[in-house]
Image (cartoon, rainbow, N blue to C red):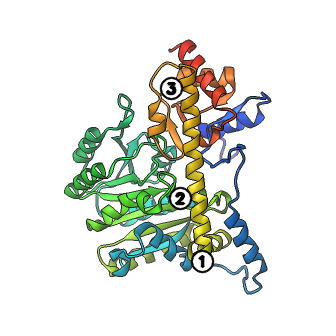
Amino acid sequence: MSHFSEVSYVDLPAVFHLSARHNADQHPDKVNLTIGAYRNEAGKPWVLPVVKKAESILAADETLNKEYLSMGGLQSFTDAATRLVLGENSPVIAEDRAVALQSLSGTGALHLAFQFIRQFYPGCKDILVSNPSWGNHKLMVDTIPGLNFVQYAYYDPTTMGVDLEGMCRDLENAKDGSVVVLHACAHNPTGIDPTMPQWEKIAEVCKKKNHFPLFDLAYLGYATGDFDQDAASIRLFANLGFEFMVCQSFAKIMGLYCERIGCLIFAGRTAEIAHKCLSQMKIIVRSIYSNPPAHGARIASMCLNNREMRQEWEDCVKEMHARIRRSRTYLHTALKTLNVPGSWDHILQQNGMFSYTGLTKAQCELMIEKHHVYLLKSGRISMCGITQDNAKYVASAMHDAILNAKEN
């Protein structure tokens, strides 16, 4: 008799299950719109040229070894990542109130943040997350005892925009001192971000309710192509005197998916508080994996700190942003050309990697089963899967689904 005989089988998350189905599909016109990873115009992964250059330099450096990094990671990386988010002239940095440690990508940063909040945050343990949001937010919160997953309104299906009134109402009605997870830019899965006046209203409510902001920053540069503009929401909260955390990923923005490189930034009320909190975060790291990996951190550090390579990297991010904008235009044009029922301007108005199409579950299922176009059944698509060559095929599948899908 096994000690584990009562363990039940659990299905893969939908995004991985559908991607696996796509990979096994032999249909010549199959399209994968599921995975949130950048693809070039040929639909292939892109290793950034500046990343290849950094790897060549590292490979030739005889002074490097394979010794452990510290629990906090590579400081030249975390310092540069903090400046990237808060700005070179940030008062929070100047006053030594911003501390950071290297994490296992953005997911690892979030996990560390939630573990720290569970142990040390004295306020309400309700974790407020947008509806909808990245599915892993709920999974992480639900698996940490003592934390409570609570949703706040975010998406208005009528306008296909931000439901600011509903969002502010829910933040207002939440328990004082709740933790509020905010997508800093390029919201996943909707592709809809608040405007700066809307961010100011959100910050006003958070200040009134003494909420603690926790920013998820996976797509810096993907929303507008400009780092400063995409980080404006975080800097607004910093300028208003909030204590906050930022969970930063370098998977998408440097193409370092498998290197698992991220950064957890904490901004405290004072330098002493910030550094005390950092020391406790390092102990959490010690209890989970002791030390983060060095290779990807060295690549990221070089791209962030070397002036010439920094410019090359920024140019790469601008190209990725421009490519996604072109994908939106390809699909929008194809939908209009085919006279697909509905208004599709929201595809152009949304930004970042994803689009919330407005397709129903039944329509998505028809597209998958009949046309081999794989997308989440929420109607979310990864715009990187759209190319100039397949946009008309995807639009045609959407047309058929809208006309013929049988709603339950």
Determine the residue positioned at 57% across, 32% down.
331
Q: Amino acid at mark 2?
A: Gly
Tell me the element at label 3: loop
Asked where in the image residue 315 lies, by quadrant, the reply is: bottom right
Provide the residue designation for mark 3: 359
Tell me the element at label 2: helix
Mark number, residue 306: 1
Provide the residue designation for mark 2: 106
Residue 227 appears at what percent x and percent y? 47, 62
Look at the picture and state if 101 lies above or below 3.
below
Mark 3 burial class by Cα count in 10 Å: few <14, some 14-19, many 20+: some
Residue 263 appears at what percent x and percent y? 51, 67
Q: Amino acid at mark 3?
A: Leu
Asked where in the image residue 104 lies, by quadrant, the reply is: bottom right
Q: Is residue 148 left or right of residue 138?
A: left
Of the numbered discs 2 and 3, the one sitting upstream in the chain is 2
Determine the residue positioned at 75% across, 82% down.
61
In front here: 348 or 353?
Answer: 348
Q: Is residue 126 visible?
A: yes
